[in-house]
Image: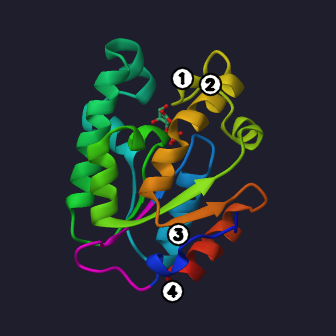
Amino acid sequence: MPRTRVADEVGGSATADRPHLILVGMMGSGKTTVGRRLAAVLDRPFRDSDELVESRTGHTVREIFEREGEEAFRREEAAVLAASLAEDEPAVVAAAGGTVLRPENRSCMRTRGRVVWLRAPTDVLVARAGAGGHRPLLDGDPGGVLEEMATARGELYRETADLVLDVDALDPDEVVTRILEAIR
Ligand code: S3P
């Protein structure tokens, strides 16, 4: 598979109906790091769905998983994603790994922005994501969980993304450059 796919569909500047640049991909794929840098270069606000959940609820991602369970977290996640994508000011949005699980999130992302999938093999994700922090799902067996998730979610990322970028051999600045090349 080529490193970038359907780059033409990502091309051009933000349009009124699809103003946002949205990064999707598994935990450890670099969405937040790359998203922050992209937002700085493009002079756009940066939004991270996990950070939005935490500021909206006053609880960490981990606390929400532990106290209320994954479904409650997914509800909050869908709400903040919809709210941030409804804004008209073009932003760079890092959509956490599980956002593709809900059809309404996938549809909203495709409708309101250009979507880039940062793709990496599981061994790279394990090394980058590690465990702990805001990733309670990785507490036990990060490698096994990430492998299962990659299988379960691969098609969802694929159907949501306008552009697939293989990031395993790229550092964050190179990823930013590749995305800028694709959107300009
Ligand atoms: C999750 C990804 C995490 C966080 C939560 C669940 C997932 O965000 O939302 O731990 O299900 O893939 P990142 O993708 O930013 O690590």
Q: Are marks 2 and 4 in contact (CB under 8 Å)?
A: no
For the residue marked with disc 1, what is the amino acid?
A: Leu
Whether the magenta-drawn stretch holds residue 21 is answered as yes
- Mark 2 or mark 1: which comes first in sequence? 1
Q: Label 1, on which residue?
A: 137
- Mark 3 or mark 1: which comes first in sequence? 3
- Mark 2 or mark 3: which comes first in sequence? 3
**Which portion, as a residue range, is magenta?**
12-22
For the residue marked with disc 2, what is the amino acid?
A: Val
Packing grade of label 1 (10 A; few <14, some 14-19, many >=20) is some
At x 38%, y 46%, the residue is 49
Horizontal side of 35 relative to 50 (left or right) equals: right
Q: Are marks 3 and 4 in contact (CB under 8 Å)?
A: no
Q: Position of residue 45 (x, y in %)?
A: 37, 66
Whether the magenta-drawn stretch holds residue 57 is answered as no
Horizontal side of 128 relative to 97 (left or right) equals: right
- Mark 2 or mark 4: which comes first in sequence? 2
Q: Which picture quadrant has residue 75?
A: top left
Q: Distance between the Cα atoms at labels 2 and 3?
A: 29 Å
User: Element under label 1?
Assistant: helix
Q: Label 4, on which residue?
A: 184
Please state which of the two labelled residues, at mark 3 or mark 4, is closer to the viewer: 4
Q: Label 2, on which residue?
A: 145
